[in-house]
Amino acid sequence: MAESIITFFIEKLSDLITREANFLTGVDEQINSLRNELEWIRSFLKDADGICKDNERVRLWVNQVRSISYDAETVIDEFIFKVERQRQRGRRGMGQLKLLHDLGNQIEQIKKRIEEVSVNKSKYGIEALQIGEPSSSSSQQSLSRRQRRTPVVEEVDVVGIEDEAEILVSQLIQGEPRLSILSIVGMGGLGKTTLAKKVYNSNEVSRHFECRAWIYMSQEYNIKELLESLLNQVAELNKRHQREVTQMSEQNLQRLLFGYLKDRRYLVVVDDIWSKDAWDSLKVVFPEATTGSRVMLTTRNKEVALHADMENIPHELRFLSKDECWTLFCKKALPKNVPLVLSPELQKVGRDIAAKCGGLPLAVVVLGGLLSRKDRIPSEWAKVLKRINGKFCEGHDQITRILALSYDDLPYNLKSCFLCLGVFPEDHEIHVRKLIQLWVAEGLVQQRGNETMEEVAEDYLEELIDRCMLQSSRRSSVGIRTCRIHDMLRNLSISEAMEDKFLDVRQITDFESPVRTHRLIVYGDLRKYISLNHNCPTRYLRSFLCHATDVYYEELGRKHWRFLCGGFRLLRVLDIPQMGITKLPNEIGEMIHLRYVGLRGNYLTSLPKTICNLINLQTLDIKPTYAVAPCCQDIPSIISEMIQLRHLHMNWGKILGSSRIGNLRNLQTLSEIEAGSWIENGLAQLTNLRKLVVRGVLNSHREALSNSIVCLENLQSLCLSTTVNDKSIVFPSLTFSNHVHLYKLQMFGRLEKLPDLHGFPQNITQLYLQGSCLMQDPMATLEKLAHLRTLVLSGEVYKGKTLVCSAGGFPELQELELVDLNEIEEWRVEEGAMSSIKRVKLFACFYLKMLPEGFQYLTTLKELEIIAMPLKNRILPENVGEDWYKIQHVPSVVIKDVFFQGPRRY
């Protein structure tokens, strides 16, 4: 842990020497000497990492090194801050000489402290300790992305719960017509959520209920957000309705949900509910009707389950048997392609390890993840067993020790990344994009060859998932979109991080407590925290994250911003989403160390010109919540001076004036920006771009845009959109044959013609077309795209009346959506077409007369949604609907009318 802190600081010293070579005359030798001393300490810390926990002397020494590193970093950061502020104010001369003199004295004091801890290392025999070799997993970090094994998509672990799942499915479907609340009860890590997911996703349950929803409640919850999530899941909401819902009061949401569910057979899962009060705040939206509706709870508290429904006996999960533990352990410890043939010696050690888990699935899974990174030989597995036995204890303490063992086994460069997971709320669905950008901004990711930091961080993420320290939540065709951390592992992350002064977590009840930490996470009202802590020391703080527990409409005042910009002036990360912020003050430009600014979900319409003073900024996220009406966000043209910028997330961002955007050579994400003269002034030079979203493409810019895109060969995701409903704007003929990395393409607007087969990206997996006004059937070309997995066609894509999917076409397609194709009357699907399809959605294709005959051959189809379609009358249970025989094999068929007209499921 301390090693990663020093690594980041050494890189900072190197950057300082390079950038300020002329200015640092007189202290450059001292800085180099300090850097060399830290290099030696770092090499020892890396080896000492494995024994730090078990040896008091090493732990004390590491804590002293960490403290010195933090103090040294503060000295350098404050020096850089003062130098930059003088430059901004145009001051020179004696002020700079004083800064250099003070810096030299402070460095000398730091070096004396380093000498003292170096003497202590020898004096107290730390050098003589047996430092173990780095774990084999550490060496794997040097492997390139191409050499690492392709991660296997996670499957639900169902060992030992098959019988329980069948019982619960039966109770959900065959129970009384009254509303029933079924509960799954058990301690953390016993598999409550796994069982609930198994039941929720079963074919029988999917067909039986007209609408379903899943919400995570946790200890800290926002009831309005939960109600919004429920409504979004059970009803088909367009963007306008979503905006209306976010503006409703809690009481209006309750009434709306109650009215919507009243006449429907619904299933709602409330995962991880902790208290009776939490249930009482939610139960009012569930009508006591006789439709056979169900609510399923998972909880650790049996009293909560009995309080919710006294007539139903809670389903209490049992611990796994020894054989079940062994089966689950093998699933995680052995890759899918390794045959389950183990030597008697290895099997004996493995069974002993699995038995130590006490029948708790989470412990089995985590230990299995640990062993999956080890050589499959008895001696290696015996080392792990010895470490478990060395700290043997019973019950919950034993499980905690097993989880801690997996943390201890992490290579040093993954430990900091794991501890960083503690910044997210319990049961939070973590967006991988944000997590990776935070890791990079925090300096937790090390450079590796020619790869970007983000690519290295993706490997870190995959390894944490392979080790079962994280769970992938949602995956796209090209990678992980979101992930979760089990709350027991999250608690481990926070406890380890607080012990190492890595971070501190503050609830609304203990805001007044001062902290000395590098990262601070606050839950609750930011205004209240500031009012209670305006005198607290903050010079060590580098990251500040605030999670709102309610909806705030009051704007941050001047005193709040003065505290943030002045008291937190050395911050690297500032993340304050959903705080009702509409304006940033000019003082934001004084926080020159900022690398990550997260203001997502606020209502910013412009940025101050001083934003360009943030010379180290890597990520600027000012995108409002998805449900807020689009509003143009004015960006000053001098943003082109922020040459370290890597990710810019906006909503209809508009660059004012003439910007030399080509200066932003490090930019990887430029999302939702309005077309303008910046396209001609340097877009083609942004060759590191991975994601580009351009809205409002006008005829005056379309040629320059097309020519520029040809140069952006590293693009992975591209979205182009013309002005809404403007049919006079036509995209010229585009070709993407040289874009080998481009997997996602969205084109919203009229096309001269569809690119031919060789004009599409060769590795494209996701394609979205809207308003293309094509005269020829696009399926003839699109079905030949060998790797296409997701296809969405909407809004006048095709002016013809017949679509044809040929035999052998769309070999990899898994998701297909046809939306607002009002010209289509016939759709033919030949036998052998779409052989991998899993989900089809038809929305408002009003003139489609019937479902294709070929649907009966789509044996892989799992889900069919038909929304606002006249042909719904043809899709009724067998012997009634004319088209029922074509889809009777599909596990989930959902029929919905327009908003709040409700679904029917068969």
Image (spheres, grey):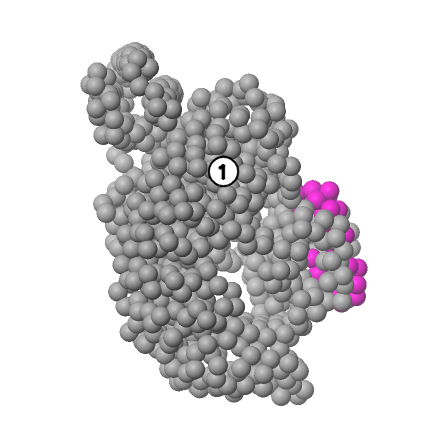
Give percent across and percent down for residue 415: 38, 37
The residue carrying mark 1 is: 575
Quadrant housing the N terminus: top left
* Badge 1 amino acid: Asp
Residue 538 visible (yes or no): yes
Residue toward you, 886 or 621 = 621
Give percent across and percent down for residue 527: 61, 30
- Measured along the vertical axis of the image, is residue 414 above or below residue 233? above
Residue 678 relative to residue 895: left or right: left
Q: Is residue 696 magenta?
A: no
- Read off the magenta span: 273-296
Residue 167 relative to residue 376: left or right: right
- Measured along the vertical axis of the image, is residue 60 above or below residue 507? above
Q: Which residue is painted at 61% across and 24% down in the image?
A: 531
* Kind of element beneath mark 1: strand
Which quadrant holds residue 832?
Answer: bottom left
